[in-house]
Amino acid sequence: MAGPGADMQWCFSQVKGAIDDDVAEADIISTVEFNHTGELLATGDKGGRVVIFQQEIENKNLPQFRSEYNVYSTFQSHEPEFDYLKSLEIEEKINKIRWLPQKNAAQFLLSTNDKTIKLWKISERDKRPEGYNLKEEDGRYKDPNSITALRVPVLIPMDLMVEASPRRVFSNAHTYHINSISVNSDNETYLSADDLRINLWNLEITDRSFNIVDIKPTNMEELTEVITAAEFHPLHCNTLVYSSSKGTIRLCDMRESALCDKHSKLFEEPEDPSNRSFFSEIISSISDVKFSHNGRYMMTRDYLSVKVWDLNMENRPVETYQVHEYLRSKLCSLYENDCIFDKFECCWNGNDSVVMTGSYNNFFRMFERSQRRDVTLEASRENSKPLQVLKPRKVCAGGKRKKDEISVDSLDFNKKILHTAWHPQENIIAVATTNNLYIFQDKVN
Amino acid sequence: MSSETPESDIQGDYEAEKQDSQEKNASTMKVEEAKLKAKYPGLGQKPGGSDLLMKRLTRGQKYFDSGDYNMAKAKMKNKQLPTAGPVKNLVTGDHIPTPQDLPQRKSSLVTSKLVG
């Protein structure tokens, strides 16, 4: 895949979802994830539903006809529940979806809400049997006395049917809210992380789970930080990382001990204590951590920036990208409207040369690592003519606002892009606004 | 950048620039902090603070008991499906319902709007 050059441009491809402004809570998109080939794109929403889109490849030889994503399957993954012991509602909102690498004809994904992880099997059926001996075609049983001969039922083609069925339910292992799931490269185990603990599961076994990280203090008054995200290394099955609300990342090696409370590496950028303010810790909280595809780097997202870390260097990131630095002078109001607690995700492109993350006003940002170029783009219905090239946007931090710039005070903080995903091989991206899913592709010259 | 500049100088420049911007950032944030303290004088002395963390851990709507929860769900369900029969719609939260009065507690039967 050619890396994006300085003149890379993005075009609108598709948008999914309702146009009306009145957004039902259930329609709020809560996670977006491509599978390992990029052929399938899954979304989860606050209503507990999963929608899977499939890339339909038409005319792969003619580059200007880029493939479209159409609905492949949709199902209700989680339902709202009630914790009778604590009288607390358990939301059906899908926090994360992670695909398993494909092993056979069926596709598998893990989806999780706050408390329960489910393994879903998505399989295709395009043939059905006809000519049963004991049943009529409509299913009614024949009178056995009327049967005089035996025949072998034959399989005849039928319209493609895609079925989703829950194969495993992994429940009752988390006291706190699950924020992450990650499939191990061994393809046999996966981790689930909540605010204070990380558990290791075997994909086949639902009644047992091993606790590998536990940061719960004996006395809850001493609680100083929580786990915000966790991920397995893409290549080394013994390595995992987890990030905290204090802006630190810990790398653990499961070979060292059964309980990985003691980290192997601690990644933290030092801060001058005199620079600390009420807001420092809040904005340093890491909302997402992602390994690069090659496993040499990891990226973290905190409120104002994206940082790329070399796994061999713990004392500071190798790259820091400012997402929306102009918000630093608005922290007071962002605290009051709770936006300061928004959890933005981030993602790598297929060859780890570009990183992407979302912002407010339906803006999203891309940072090209080697050339140090960045761009701000917008996902909006106004720029949604087929193959329309997206115009870079600019926010004016203060002073004289140039034409086409937007001033910080005009930004819509209700329009946030928290979830984005990049196709693992091609320059196709999926960007989720509150209730719409946008698909963009690079302009093919 | 000149190729004759020794590495240590570049490193020194980088460190100095970083410190400058860190200090500038810190003063911006301190201004914001002052604004916040002016509005909410009682706000936690500890920065970030375990109050925020505890709130995070216990996130989730609390109900008095499962009955309260089911009534609230029924009320929401009736709002979402206005055509679901007139008589049943009236029985929510105003008096103790009998089992026949409560609609079936099933979650959203509506397909996601992302589909078609």
Image (cartoon, rainbow, N blue to C red):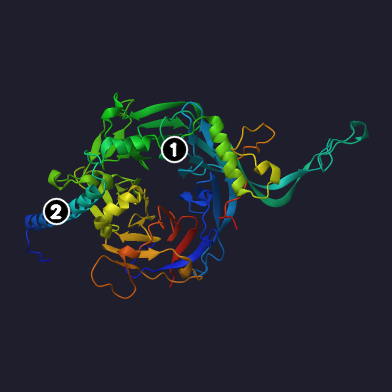
Image x and y of residue A441, in percent = 45, 64
Give whichever of B34, A283 is nearer the camera: B34
Comparing A196 with A163, the one in front is: A196
Q: Position of residue A299 (x, y in %)?
A: 31, 49
In the displayed structure, A445 sits above or below A358; it is: below
Which mark sits nearer the N-terminus, 2 or 1? Answer: 2
Left or right of A320 on screen, residue A91: right
Provide the residue designation for mark 2. B23
* Mark linked to residue A362: none
**Circle 1: residue type:** Gly
Where residue A272 appears, as percent x and y from the top left, is 14, 46
Quarter holding residue A262: top left
Same chain assignment for discs 2 and 1: yes
The numbered mark at residue B60 is 1
Badge 1 sits on which subunit? B
* Residue B113 point in image, percent of width and height: 57, 55
Residue placed at 26% from the left, 38% from the top?
B49
Local packing at callout 1 (Cα closer than 10 Å; few below 14, some 14-19, many 20+) is: some
Residue drawn at x 48%, y 39% is A112
The relative height of residue A372 versus residue B65 in the rendered view (above or below) is below
Q: Is residue A237 visible?
A: no
Which element type, helix, strand or loop, lies under badge 2? helix
Inspect this view and state whether residue A73 appears: yes
How many other residues sit within 10 Å of disc 2, few (<14), some (14-19) or many (≥20)? some
Question: Which quadrant holds residue B27?
Answer: bottom left
